[in-house]
Amino acid sequence: MDLSERKLKILQAIINDYVTTAEPVGSRTLTRKYDLGVSAATIRNEMSDLEDMGYLTHPHTSAGRVPSDKAYRLYVNELMGKRPLSRNEKQAINERLAVDLNEFDDTIKHAAELLSEITKLASFAMTPEVSRDTLKFIKLLPVSEDAVVMMIVADSGNISNTTLRISVPYTAEALEILSKTMTYNYKGRTIDDVLRSSLIADFKSDIEAMNALTQNVMPGFIKTLEDMLNVNLYMEGLTNIFNIQEYSSIDKAKAFIETLSRREEFTRDMLQRDDGMIVTIGEENPEDDMKDYSLITATYHVDGKLVGKLGVIGPTRMNYGEVTSIMEYLSDNLSKSFKLVGGKDKERDK
């Protein structure tokens, strides 16, 4: 059922008020603070409907309502407005993130610190550690009509097996040829070096007749190589949790910190998230111990290639418009700065 314009207006007012105050919102509060153009009785009826529809919950100890995860999802998708960053905020970001590719990790660590300072939430940043591991061979094995297994073996013994979905017909002979061609092209090269090359363009000229199959395989090859890189994870602002009302009890704050202390598990989960700006709210998070939190991640790039992620973790009662605006500016700033620095380095190399 679609929400009427009046219900949407009331729901947005409830979310805005609850995000600011952390107090359940009642009809009298809405009538006093917001010009909704209807009586308190009408607002109560609409709030009751919104609760029946799953957008509001009713704490037992209060006459007011609080937004549900469903309400926050609607808000993020349709209602929130992006908050423009102030000149001072932009200036602080630009000055703190002066990029030097020789100090790549320090720059990303500063980005995590800055994100935590501005949002007052726990934040993190991830970046691959430049790997000197070299590739030994690549093998493609048939599984079914629409799937193959790709095995990548590095000289260090690091092995990755990935199942790839294939949308074009193939034969075992074609896979064997492609395996040998990929091994020939990339054997002895570092993972970082391979990721920086024009992989699909190279294969178009090498094996034009197998181009359709190549186009299916190469994106999975690139993604697997990225996952094989070691990852540095920087976390900042964990103590910000003690200033958030939802985690005022020691038990809740301890549970939050314990969740983020499982670094290997957390890093693996973050690597599996999609690229771009991704917002997961409460129950949308697949991990059981993240059901009470919202998680927002954004990706940044170097030389046009995906490199890492920035993120914040906090209560579902989060100012999504403000946080996503800040993260968007930060990630764009990183990507543009690294692009400019990379371009200057290339010019010097000529």
Image (tube, grey):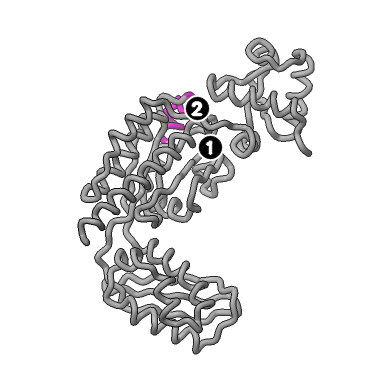
Residue that appears at 55% across and 25% down: 19
- Asked if disc 1 and disc 2 are in contact, CB closer than 8 Å, the reply is yes
Q: Position of residue 3 (x, y in %)?
A: 75, 33
Q: Position of residue 263 (x, y in %)?
A: 36, 48
Q: Residue furthest bottom?
A: 173
Per the image, the residue denoted by label 1 is 292
Residue that appears at 45% across and 40% down: 328
Please identify the quadrant where the N terminus is shown: top right
Q: Is residue 115 magenta?
A: no
Per the image, the residue denoted by label 2 is 246
For residue 157, which quarter of the picture? bottom left
What's the residue type where badge 2 is placed?
Glu
- In the image, residue 162 sits, relative to residue 331, either above or below, namely below
Query: What is the magenta segment's predominant secondary structure?
Result: helix
What's the residue type where badge 1 is placed?
Asp
User: What is the span of residues highlighted in magenta in the rendered image?
Assistant: 245-254
Q: Position of residue 156 (x, y in %)?
A: 26, 71
> Is 118 in front, or is 335?
335
Secondary structure under tag 1 reads: loop
For residue 18, which quarter of the picture? top right
Q: Position of residue 227 (x, y in %)?
A: 39, 61
> Is 197 in front, or is 20?
197
Residue that appears at 51% across and 87% down: 172
For residue 34, which quarter of the picture? top right
In whole angstroms, how far apart are the C-alphas of marks 1 and 2? 10 Å
- In the image, residue 29 sits, relative to residue 182, either above or below, namely above
